[in-house]
Image (spheres, rainbow, N blue to C red):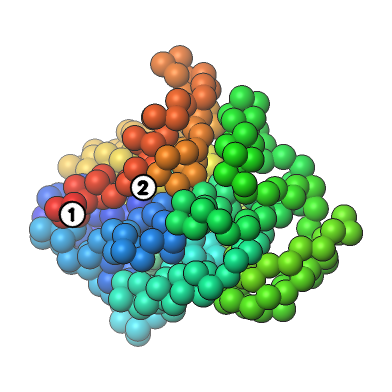
Amino acid sequence: MGEVVAVVGGGYAGTLVAKELDGDAQVVLVDPRDTFVNVAGSLRALARPDWAHHVFFPYRALLARGRVLRDLAASVDAGGVTLAGGGRLDADYLVLATGSSYSYPARPRQAATSAAQALAELRATHDQLARAERVLILGAGPVGLELAGEIREAWPHKGIVVVDPAAEILPGFLPEVRRELRRQLDALGIELRLGTALDGLPPFEDGTAGTFTVSTTGGEKITADIWFRSFGARVNTGYLADGKLVALTDRATVPVDEHLAVRGHRHVYAVGDIADLPDAKMATHAQTQALVVVENVRAQLRGEPPRSGYQPARTRRILLPLGTRGGVGQMPDQDGLPVAAPLDTVIRRKGTDLFTARFAERFGHQVE
Ligand SMILES: Cc1cc2nc3c(=O)[nH]c(=O)nc-3n(C[C@H](O)[C@H](O)[C@H](O)COP(=O)(O)OP(=O)(O)OC[C@H]3O[C@@H](n4cnc5c(N)ncnc54)[C@H](O)[C@@H]3O)c2cc1C
């Protein structure tokens, strides 16, 4: 129990690693927030303020023995973490799991490190959105489309237009999944403008009500009363840019070996969105990787070499709800081949509660 495992980042992967190793070592979880954020629920949290508290799970309920250090890693080297608050955390093992940033409201703004602040911001944006009759969403990826679906369910009559320079939605997914998604979007009156971009961003801040007209590169004019940015994910690896641990890849991700150890290190691991792996940046893969690292650290704590290897996912998967009653999905079948998920699977596995029950279990909460 004497060895210290520092887990940097308390998202999907980091909280799983920390909880699993809590009985094996002295775990210290470092995160600037006071709660885990189940970001998969962020868009419903915007559309339904009465439900919004469901996405925040206090870290204090996660660990029985370990502790949570509310701070930001400013730098990491093989021996530990230098904290933005000025302190130093020495560790025998390090697991880096700092994930990615995405434009608000898909994730809380970086400055809103408490759930209370993040909820207040969501409520304020909800009020702005409630005043807007026409909504423009920039980005028709899964996040932009889920946002459109949540807005539609909360406000059946608002105009919703989604613009994206890509020619098709969900490129690389099965044609029947993409066709079904287009059908449902049409039925919900969510308008898609694909293969086009705006000449310039709207004159108001995103998420702030104010009527504007913008032109697309295709020459169309779009008038709306609020807009949201649903593009621009970035991995959170700035604290590694000093090169004290490893040279980042040209995508700013962390190079790892087959055991998910950071290249050149035996006791430092990287998981989730920041790991340089071919997987899509998804919580589901982050958590599978987390369990591989748990096995490897456990083996090392017993004095054995790490044996658990990670195989990146072979099949693209997605669950993309449009509110609580619609959406599409793609999953691997028992042979690993991609198949379209039936609507009731999408609703049951994600749309109904956006994984709230699953995280309530991890954090020992009762779901109301
Ligand atoms: C709207 C939305 C819906 C999604 N739906 C799905 C879905 O249905 N299924 C799916 O598989 N994936 C989904 N994803 C993707 C998923 O959220 C990410 O892949 C996942 O969050 C990555 O997990 P992670 O553990 O790598 O990091 P994250 O969950 O991003 O957690 C990183 C943590 O690190 C902390 N941190 C950052 N920098 C530092 C630092 N310097 N020091 C200390 N702590 C730091 C952050 O505060 C955060 O708590 C969705 C994403 C969005 C935005």
Q: Quadrant of the C terminus?
A: bottom left
How far apart marks 2 and 1 lie (CA) works out to: 14 Å
345 with respect to 137 (left or right)? left
Give the image location of residue 205, x and y in percent: 62, 78
Tell me: 289 left or right of 150. left
Say which of 15 and 319 sits in front.
319
Q: Where 232 falls versus 19 (above or below)?
A: below
Q: Is residue 326 visible?
A: yes
| Quadrant into which the N terminus falls | bottom left
Q: Which residue is nearer to you in this view: 74 or 32? A: 32
Mark 2 neighbour class, 10 Å CA radius: few under 14, some 14 to 19, many 20 or more: many
Of 335 and 208, the residue lying toward us: 208
**Which element type, helix, strand or loop, lies under badge 1?**
loop
Going by the picture, which residue comes out furthest to the front?
157
* Of residues 243 and 169, the one drawn nearer to the viewer in this rendering: 169
| Residue 368 circle label | 1
User: Which of marks 1 and 2 precedes in the sequence?
Assistant: 2
Q: Is residue 352 above or below residue 66?
A: above
The image quarter in which residue 241 lies: bottom right
Residue at left 40%, top 44%? 324
Give the percent coordinates (x, y) of residue 261.
41, 47
Q: Nearer the viewer, mark 2 or mark 1?
A: 1
Tell me which amino acid carries mark 2. Answer: Leu
Tell me: is circle 2 under 8 Å from ligand 1. yes
Res 82 seen here: no
